[in-house]
Image (tube, coloured by chain):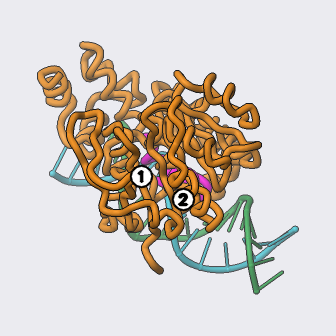
Chain colours: A orange, B cyan, C green
Amino acid sequence: MPEPRVAVVLTPDAPLFETAVPLSVFGIDRSDDGVPRFETLVAGASPGAVPTTAGLTVAAPYDLAVLPTAGLVIVPTWPDPHRAPDADLVEALRSAYDAGAIVLGLCLGTFVLAAAGLLDGRRATTHWRHTALLAERYPQIEVDAAALYVDEGQVVTSAGTAAGLDACLHVVRREHGAEAAAAIARRMVVAPHRAGGQSQFIRPPDDEAAGRFAEVLEWATKHLGESLGVDDLQHRAGLSRRSFDRRFREEVGTSPLQWLLHQRILAAQRLLESTSLSVDEIAGRCGFSTAVSLRPQFRRIVGTSPRAYREAFHTTS
DNA sequence: CAGTAACCCCGCCACG
DNA sequence: AGCGTGGCGGGGTTAC
């Protein structure tokens, strides 16, 4: 099987962070973690070197001709929502779409997709500062200002900056499975599921079962202190134990207990960062019976002891 | 650290 | 045949 080809558009006056987000997800070889390798091509929207918002200048090795050859095309940003995208970018995007490519617009990249007509009659989102402008200029788009990202199948759009990361991971998950997405998230050291909960997620409307699953996960993160077991989650999901285990791995990319342990450790890290509670107290609040049971898990997942973590956090920031 | 009890979780397979 | 479900077994992991 050939490596899936991903094209990332380098836009004029590129905001560096937004451009780097999809490259960090797709452009790094993590095949040693079981993640598929992507052939990631950076395509310049205009020839030559491009200045970035970070003050440095970058050059793209490819041009817009590669867009129609890619299976996934990402427009990470656009410099200014009032500025109309160039005709050749719009055209390249359209032919990529017509060739069957998935098109992903992050942040203001949504405006480029809109200009290409790819969002007509669909739901979409963009950076919260410009959702009103998007809705005003494109009344045929159903703008969802509350969504982190919106999945319309062949077209996916995300809200500002960091939500682009969620959208990229979502596409990996959809196309290559939760296990691959979880592995990437782990390597990038981001939470595979936003701490804020699943309520921000806009899922495909037909995905009822997955929505129920998400509800259970959100409930679990709010009751970590009650030392829930896997059977508590299973019971709430209303599935048999066997089906719950199976579905959990498909949906989340890890086993229920391992997920729970990760959530507990994440909670412990937050408390270590933001409070001066004793490790014992923190252990209790995160669902460990004592600090004794917290410590080995903390070391396994974070790599240090709770105390060392707290100290390092406060001296680094 | 060591021992034991409890729990997890995934292959296997029968069932609808 | 194909597909999702769920009981069972038990090696492996985790809790105390």
Amino acid bearing label 1: Ala
- Compare residues A228 and A202 and report the one nearer the observer: A202
Considering depth in this image, is A35 or A68 the residue closer to the camera? A68
Residue ID at (63%, 58%)? A242
**Which residue is found at the position 63% from the left and 46% from the top?**
A151
Q: Which contiguous range is marked in magenta? A: A246-260
Rendered location of residue A237, percent (x, y): 67, 42
Residue picked out by circle 1 = A45
| Image position of A10 (left or right of A99) | left
Q: Secondary structure at mark 2?
A: helix
Indicate the position of residue A29 as horizontal and vertical percent values.
31, 63
Q: As drawn, is A312 to the left or to the right of A125?
A: left
Q: Is residue A255 magenta?
A: yes
Quadrant where the C terminus of chain A sits is top left
Specify whether A137 is left or right of A313. Answer: right
Quarter assignment of residue A279: top left
Which residue, as the protein is rendered here, is positioned at the far left?
Answer: A315
Q: Quadrant of residue A292?
A: top left
Q: Quadrant of residue A92?
A: bottom right
Disc 2 marks a residue whose amino acid type is Ala
- Chain ID for label 2? A
Is label 1 in a helix, a strand or a loop? loop
Q: In the image, is residue A315 above or below residue A253?
A: above
The residue beneath circle 2 is: A92
The chief SS type of the magenta part is helix
